[in-house]
Amino acid sequence: MELTLASLHKGQVPWKGLLLADAVAKPTIQIFNTTVKEYEAVNITCVTDDPKNSIRWHFNGHVLQLPDRMMLYQNGGILSIQSVREEDSGLYECEVFNSAVSKKSDPIQLDVIRECPLLPHLLHSVGVGQFLYQQNGQKPQGEKPLLKIQKQSAW
């Protein structure tokens, strides 16, 4: 138990007293891989020692607003992101709290790698000749192409 000095108001009468509240241990975050490819799924788990406490997720220092492709499971302890996007890259924290106290986990950095959406099709169709792919379909001035595939005699 933790003693917390609370200043509460009941109606219009000020009330000061001690509020007995369960202590909250600092949670930890578990994730299989902090670097994922765009459009993959990822689960981030908030590990806490007391399942009766509530869990809230933070993204880049703000309370996470869940878009349709994000879901919470096991009383908020698992944040599941379906079809990860570039904008999902950033710092994630979980906060465990009860009516009087709260603690945040250390943040983890999730990195989302963006791949060329045409790459699988291009790799499938390069059996003949040479193909150069540049970002946005244009060769950057003075730079080498990002990907160069040439037909080899072994093909």
Image: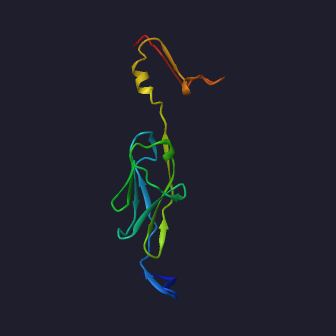
For this orientation, the residue located farthest to the left is 74
Residue situated in front as seen by the camera: 127 or 121: 121
Residue situated in front as seen by the camera: 129 or 87: 87
**In which quadrant of the rendered image does the C terminus lie?**
top left
For this orientation, the residue located farthest to the front is 12
Residue located at (43% from left, 22% from top) = 122
Residue located at (35% from left, 62% from top) = 75
Percent from the top left, x then y, of residue 120? 41, 26
**In which quadrant of the rendered image does the N terminus lie?**
bottom left
The image shows residue 30, relative to residue 8, as above or below, that is above
The image shows residue 146, relative to residue 23, as above or below, that is above
In the picture, measured across the screen, residue 87 lies left or right of residue 155, that is right
The image shows residue 50, relative to residue 127, as above or below, that is below
Colour setup of the view: rainbow
Percent from the top left, x then y, of residue 69? 39, 47
The image shows residue 16, relative to residue 136, as above or below, that is below
| Image mark count | 0
Percent from the top left, x then y, of residue 117? 45, 30
Residue located at (65% from left, 23% from top) = 141
Percent from the top left, x then y, of residue 89? 51, 46
Residue located at (41% from left, 60% from top) = 46
